[in-house]
Image (tube, grey):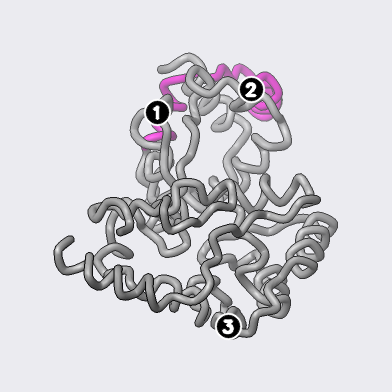
Amino acid sequence: METYAAEAAKQAPGYQPSGERGAALYSKRFGVSEKMPACTACHTETPDQAGRHAVTGKAIKPLGPRAEAARFTDAAKTEKWFRRNCSEVVGRECSAAEKADFILFLTEGK
Amino acid sequence: MRHILIPFFSAAILALPAHADRLPVPAGAPPAFAAECGSCHLPFPPALLTAPDWKRVMASLDKHYGDNASLDEKTRRELEDFLVRHAATDRRKAGAGDPPRLTESAWFRREHREVPQAVWRDARVKSAANCAACHPRAEAGSYSEREIVVPGLGKHK
């Protein structure tokens, strides 16, 4: 998260990660993808809970690091899934600021 | 519904040919196999599709059943080689459509012909490719009939 926060601060001086913005991003219905309109489509309203892939039905371990300690510990994996899921669900890449907000929300709550 | 299915299942068991109880992922799978092919769905046993069909799947990862599952070329190649090396040689698994779906092969359809339509549409199943919905030990490569538990119908009889 620090890496994303630092990058965001470089782009917009004074940037501070916000769990509240992260929560809004997490639950926002983008509606770009019919089957995956929001993060919650697969990861549920409660990120500390196990989820299920909206298309394949496969079980997904909780996204929240409080429930699944390995989450966001592997930078390459984190970036890969932001890339894939942002383009799928949000319809574009997510910014460094959004990623830092998102991780802060999942780690510490709003 | 169960009372209708029991005689149906029993008759079908007698009629079934040799079962594919074990469909393990072969040893020596590249680590990327579980990581890349097993995050959104079960890492499917390579023996469920033929080599030409696997090549077709791996040639269009940017349009992977509605998802962009692109990989860097080195990983893509490595996974394709692994899949092709262990692909099905049984022609009943050939011709799984375009794009190929392992659930469309003659073999798959025959093995699952007793499954009522409603089961495929059940929210707990979602997709015919969700093997683990009814085969609880699918991830371990075990598809024994004794283990089958169909959502809404219970254990296979």
- Return the x and y of residue A68 as percentages of the image width and height: 53, 23
Mark 3 or mark 2, whichever is nearer to me? 3
Classify A97 as above or below B123.
Answer: above
Marks 3 and 1, how far apart at CA? 41 Å
**From mark 1 to mark 2, how far is it between C-alphas?**
21 Å
- The disc placed on residue A63 is none
The residue labelled by disc 3 is: B92
- Callout 3: chain: B
Residue A58 position within the rendered picture, expressed as x and y whole percent measured from the top left: 46, 48
Q: Secondary structure at mark 2?
A: loop
Instruction: Kindly identify which residue carries mark 2.
Output: A1
Q: Nearer the viewer, residue A19 or A59?
A: A59
Q: Residue furthest front?
A: B14
Residue at figure coordinates x 52%, y 51% from the top left: B138
Q: Are marks 3 and 1 on the same chain?
A: no
Q: Quadrant of the C terminus of chain B?
A: bottom left
- Disc 3 versus disc 1: nearer the observer: 3
> Residue B128 at x, y = what percent?
42, 64
Question: Amino acid type of disc 3?
Answer: Arg
Q: Are marks 3 and 2 in contact (CB under 8 Å)?
A: no
